[in-house]
Image (spheres, rainbow, N blue to C red):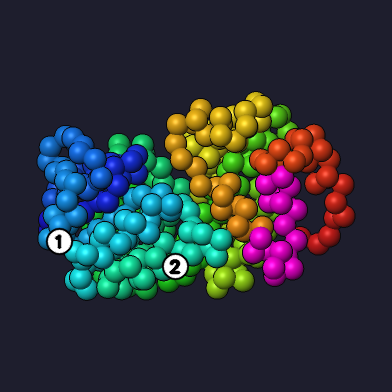
Amino acid sequence: MSLRIGVVGAGGFGRAIAQSSARRGHEVLLWSRQARELPDPIRTSTDTADLLDCELVFIAVPARHAVSAAEQLGEVVDGRHLMVHVSRGLVGADLKTITKVIREKTVCRRIGALAGPLVADALAEGRPSGAILGTGFPELTEMVRDAIGGAGLRIYDTTDVVGVELASATVGFLTVVLGYAQEIGVEPGTVAVLATRGMVEISRIGQTLGAKESTFLGLAGLGDLIAAVAGDQRPEFRLGRAMARGADLRTAIGEVGAYVEGIEVARHLMEHAQRHGLETPISSTFVAVAEGRMSSDDAIQALMERRVGKE
């Protein structure tokens, strides 16, 4: 059955969702602030009112634009619409999730978050991959599977929505860390320590915000991180490499050519962890490196000299 699908945001992920949905025979409308052209049969628009007839709306904008996008959608959508976002970020120092923003700015309640080892190129081209959908609404899961799932894309689901969103956002930061580590030539064993202990740190933070530890060990967390280390060439990994070559944060972001939310998220995570008395040596050390307060040599030495405890 053909669905009427709306996509908000014409970045790489937005275009990939639109292409994937159109390839499966659905009617697709892509909305963006500026006029765009995409191959038929995808329609494009700069008028949010055109999204009114859509059944399922994907929100594919960075977290920093999520509030304004949700406000615009709030003027046209109603309780009939189902929504899912693919942002890897959080909003503000209080680590507000995008689903919470959607609930605050719209009347839509059947919402969810799509995350995991899914990159835009693979989705657009139909290459085999997997994803995890966090939602409490089975009808949304089925509709998302109909929209972009299939033999080439396995979409699993969980009711731990906040866990999916937090894992996705924090894995983005850890990916920067691992890109940095590989570029400076650390040994594979050290990369493994950074990945596993870093995941422990962010899962502990996630649990203070209501997430389940197991979610960080699944596709939204560890699965996503494995894909990054395996070389899916996501922007966060390239950002870490650029920083390791000596570029400051602003210059490195320019080299990558894409907005990366991981560093900003990390700063807010560290503030949250401190308020809760959590130790986050890997995350805190890398934030210091990113801000120019510590060299890479001093960072590795400081981490390796820490007292070793139980796993």
Left/right placement of residue 223 relative to residue 71 reads right
- The quadrant the C terminus occupies is bottom right
Q: Is residue 126 magenta?
A: no
What type is the residue that disc 1 sits on? Leu
Question: Mostly what secondary structure, the magenta segment?
Answer: helix
Q: Which mark is residue 281?
A: none
Q: What residue did someone put label 2 on? A: 161
Query: Could you tell me how many numbered marks the image carries?
Result: 2
Query: Which is nearer the eye, 207 or 149?
Result: 207
Q: What residue did someone put label 1 on? A: 52
Query: Which is nearer the eye, 304 or 154?
Result: 304
Indicate the position of residue 131 as horizontal and vertical percent values.
40, 53
Q: Secondary structure at mark 1?
A: helix
Indicate the position of residue 241 as horizontal and vertical percent values.
60, 31
Left/right placement of residue 308 relative to residue 120 reads right
The answer to which image quadrant residue 200 occupies is: bottom right
What type is the residue that disc 2 sits on? Val
Q: Does residue 127 appear in this view?
A: no
User: Which numbered mark, 2 or 1, is in the foreground of this view?
Assistant: 1
The residues colored magenta run 271-288
Check disc 1: other Cα within 10 Å, few if <14, some if 14-19, many if 20+.
some
In the image, is residue 108 above or below residue 250?
Answer: below
The answer to which image quadrant residue 132 occupies is: bottom left
Mark sitting earlier along the chain (2/1): 1
Indicate the position of residue 163 as horizontal and vertical percent values.
51, 65
In the image, is residue 7 above or below residue 121?
Answer: below
Left/right placement of residue 193 relative to residue 301 reads left
Left/right placement of residue 265 relative to residue 270 reads left
Q: Secondary structure at mark 2?
A: helix
The residue shown at (36%, 49%) is: 61
**Residue at mark 2 to residue at mark 1: CA–CA distance:** 25 Å
The residue shown at (87%, 47%) is: 305
